[in-house]
Structures are given as C-alpha cells and as structure tokens.
C-alpha cells in the first residue's frame, strides 16, 4: 500500500509564511533605517546649528577686533602726526631761542660808533653790512665779534669809504659756531 502525501499545499503555506516574515523583517528594517537616519540627521542638524552659532560669535568678535585695530591704527597715526608737530614746535622754539641769542650776542659785541645796517643768515653763515666812523672801530668790532662764544673769526670782505668822508661802510661774514635751525633748514613753512 502506498500512501501518497501531497506536500505541495504545506510547502506553499510555508513559502507564504517565509515571504510574510521576510517582508515584515524588511519593513521593520526600513522603519529602523528611517528612524536611525532621521536621528542622525537631527544630531547633525543640531551640530550644524551649534557650529553656525560659534561661527557667528567668531565673526562678531572678528568684526569688533577689526574695528578696534582700525581705531588703534588711527590713534597711532594721530600720535605720529602729534609727534611730528611737536618736533616742528621744538625746532621753532629752538630757532626762536637761537635767534634771540644771536641778536643778544651781536648787541653785546657792538662797539661804539658801529651801526649794523643789514643782517642775513644762511644756514650757519651770517652776512653783515655795517657802518663805522673809522678803521679803528671796524677793527675793534671784528675783534669783539671774534671773542664772542657763538661766533667764529669774522672775515672782512669789503670796506668802502663814504664819499662825503663821514665814515666807512664795511661788509663781513662770520660762521656761527653754535648751529642754528633756520626755517629753510627745518623744512617748516613760516
């Protein structure tokens, strides 16, 4: 006797169970993948937001520091300009003092009967035109000038007698031993 068992229905049912189980597992994996991807995306978005906040904070500080640097550069430039002005003022003050000292020395050396007619200073060289009654006064004037501490030995360049016989006009140059700062030397416009 032979029994015939038909396993085709059982196999079909088993195949359907496997297929349902496969689709269920695939659906669960798909849901888990979507949830995991969404979670990772959410974490990345939060990290991106935090980084953007840090970037904005740094950009604000960079802008503030750039502004402070430009202010500091402007202050340094103003300080340099003030220093240049101070240097100019000091030169002018020194020139004023030296000019006053020059005239004081000239007045102190002025001999009796001598009159200075024209004074001209170029750098450290002083050109003087003067009048005197006789040669003795001229010689005395040149000697007195040579004895003054701010002057070198004067060099007589010209002496002319007055046509009416009332005196002599003479011209001499002298080097200043204490250097002075003139307006032409200092580059300062009056």
Image (cartoon, grey):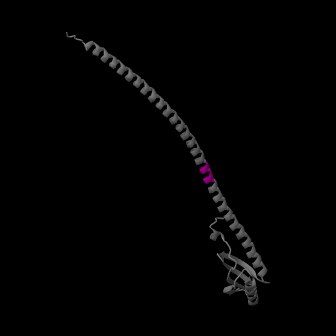
Name which residue lies at 60% across and 54% down: 73
Q: In the image, which residues are magenta? A: 68-74
Q: Position of residue 60 (x, y in %)?
A: 58, 42
Front in this rendered view, residue 160 or 92: 92
Quarter of the figure that contains the N terminus: top left
Label the magenta part by its dominant secondary structure: helix
- Residue 36's place in the image compared with 148, above or below, is above
Q: Residue furthest front?
A: 1
Between 58 and 18, the one nearer to me in the picture:
18
Name, please, the residue furthest toward the right.
112
Is 71 covered by the magenta stretch? Answer: yes
User: In the figure, 82 relative to 114: above or below?
Assistant: above
Q: Is residue 161 magenta?
A: no
Residue drawn where x is 51% and y is 36% of the image? 47
Where is residue 43? Give x, y as percent. 50, 32
Left or right: where 48 falls relative to 108: left
Q: Quick check: 31 above or below 165? A: above
Numbered disc total: 0
Q: Position of residue 119 (x, y in %)?
A: 69, 76
């Amino acid at each position: 006797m032979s029994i015939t068992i038909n396993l085709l229905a059982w196999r079909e049912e088993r195949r359907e169970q496997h297929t349902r189980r496969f689709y269920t597992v695939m659906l669960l994996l798909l849901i888990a993948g979507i949830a995991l991807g969404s979670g990772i995306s959410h974490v990345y978005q939060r990290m991106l937001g935090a980084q953007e906040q840090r970037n904005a904070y740094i950009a604000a500080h960079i802008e503030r520091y750039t502004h402070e640097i430009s202010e500091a550069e402007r202050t340094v430039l103003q300080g340099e300009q003030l220093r240049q002005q101070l240097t100019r003022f000091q030169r002018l003050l020194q020139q004023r003092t030296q000019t006053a000292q020059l005239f004081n020395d000239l007045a102190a050396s002025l001999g009796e009967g001598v009159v200075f007619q024209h004074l001209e200073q170029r750098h450290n060289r002083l050109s003087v035109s003067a009048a005197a009654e006789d040669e003795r006064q001229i010689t005395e004037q040149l000697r007195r000038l040579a004895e003054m501490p701010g002057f070198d030995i004067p060099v007589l360049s010209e002496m002319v007698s007055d046509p009416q016989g009332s005196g002599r006009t003479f011209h001499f140059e002298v080097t200043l031993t204490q250097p002075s700062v003139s307006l032409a030397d200092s580059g300062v416009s009056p």
